[in-house]
Image (tube, grey):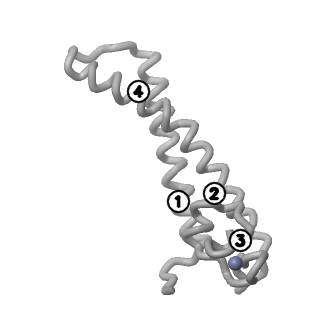
Amino acid sequence: MKREVPLRKQLEAQLETLEQRLVRLEDHQRNRHDRGPTLDSDDHAIELENEEVVEALIPKTMDEITLLRRALTRLDALLPGESITCDRCDKPIDPRRLALVPETRFCARCA
Ligand SMILES: [Zn+2]
């Protein structure tokens, strides 16, 4: 498999995206509480829908950030040139899998 972007860079980029999203979500929520509804009724209906989405997204985004930080900590513990390997078959774990389940100790085949 071709690996265009090193895992660390990839995870850092994901982490940055998530942190920016979290800031926007929290801003959105805070502004609503400060301002109250100021939009006309059509827009207000859309806003209410958005708010449900926002409330569901904030904890999800926080969880993802925690997992990514953990994955980065694991990567930092590796020596240069080393990759995170499967505890069972000792093959490198697919970076895409690590990005999804950063604390896994097994490759997709062994899990
Ligand atoms: Zn394995």
Describe the element under mark 1 as helix, strand or loop: helix
The nearer-to-camera label among 1 and 3 is: 3
Q: Which label sits on residue 106? A: 3
Alpha-carbon span between mark 1 and mark 2: 8 Å
> Which corner quadrant of the figure contains ligand 1?
bottom right
> Tag 4: Cα neighbours inside 10 Å, few (<14), some, or many (≥20)?
some
> Tag 1: Cα neighbours inside 10 Å, few (<14), some, or many (≥20)?
some
From the Cβ of disc 3, is ligand 1 less than 8 Å away? yes
Which residue sits at x=20%, y=20%? 42
- Under mark 1, the amino acid is Gln
> Tag 2: Cα neighbours inside 10 Å, few (<14), some, or many (≥20)?
many
Q: Is residue 86 above or below residue 25?
A: below
Would residue 15 appear left or right of 53 to someone viewing this image?
Answer: right
Would residue 40 appear left or right of 109 to someone viewing this image?
Answer: left
Q: Which residue is mark 4?
A: 51
Q: Which label sits on residue 68? A: 2
Assign the C terminus to one quadrant of the image. Answer: bottom right
Describe the element under mark 2 as helix, strand or loop: helix
Task: Kindly indicate the quadrant of the structure image that contains residue 39.
Answer: top left
Q: Earlier in the sequence, mark 4 or mark 2?
A: 4
In this rendered view, identify the residue nearer to me: 110 or 79: 110
Which residue sits at x=50%, y=32%? 26
Q: Earlier in the sequence, mark 4 or mark 3?
A: 4
